[in-house]
Image (cartoon, rainbow, N blue to C red):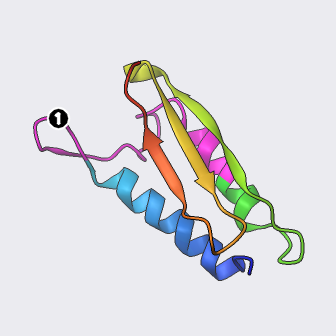
């Protein structure tokens, strides 16, 4: 079963809420979603728009990596087409 538009919107809202309430190292809450705060946000917004607006009959996974320049790390994401897959949005540590 594929995620319909309202389910895709819910997935994106969940990720955006977590970005707006990101818990920093010292426990402080930082709004990473704020314009200009993180280099990858505009690109991720564009990806989310494409994902949300896909035709319900032709839904594909949106997945990849974005570079989080400010902390020199990658953000890995998966916006799933199918309900059987779990969405992913992770800031990966340095390896």
**15 relative to 77 in the view: left or right:** left
Q: Which one is in front, 49 or 59?
A: 59
Q: Which part of the image, by quadrant, shows the N terminus? A: bottom right
Q: Specify whether residue 29 is painted magenta.
A: yes
Q: Where is residue 11 in the image (x, y as percent from the top left)?
A: 54, 68
User: Within the image, what quadrant is residue 3 found in?
Assistant: bottom right
> What's the magenta bit mostly, secondary-structure-wise?
loop
10 Å crowding of disc 1: few (<14), some (14-19), many (20+): few
Residue 86 higher or lower than 22, as above or below: below
User: Within the image, what quadrant is residue 5 found in?
Assistant: bottom right
At 86% from the left edge and 72% from the top edge, which residue is drawn? 55
At 21% from the left edge and 39% from the top edge, which residue is drawn? 24
Judged from the image, the secondary structure of the residue bearing numbered disc 1 is loop
At 44% from the left edge and 43% from the top edge, which residue is drawn? 90
Q: Position of residue 27 (x, y in %)?
A: 12, 44
Tally the numbered discs.
1
At 60% from the left edge and 45% from the top edge, which residue is drawn? 44
**41 relative to 51 in the view: left or right:** left
Tag 1 residue: 25
Q: Where is residue 80 in the image (x, y as percent from the top left)?
A: 66, 62
Residue 67 higher or lower than 56, as above or below: above
**14 relative to 78 in the view: left or right:** left
Residue segment shown in magenta: 23-47
Residue 21 higher or lower than 43, as above or below: below
**49 relative to 18 in the view: left or right:** right
Q: Which one is in front, 1 or 66?
A: 1
Q: Which part of the image, by quadrant, shows the C terminus? A: top left
Q: Residue furthest left?
A: 26
């Amino acid at each position: 079963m594929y995620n319909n538009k309202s389910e895709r919107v819910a997935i994106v809202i969940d990720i955006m809420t977590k970005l707006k309430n990101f818990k920093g190292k010292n426990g402080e809450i930082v709004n990473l979603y704020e314009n200009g705060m993180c280099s990858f946000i505009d690109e991720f917004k564009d990806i989310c728009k494409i994902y949300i607006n896909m035709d319900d009959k032709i839904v594909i996974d949106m997945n990849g990596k974005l570079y989080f320049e400010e902390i020199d790390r990658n953000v890995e994401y998966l916006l799933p087409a199918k309900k059987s897959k779990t969405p992913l949005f992770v800031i990966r540590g340095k390896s």
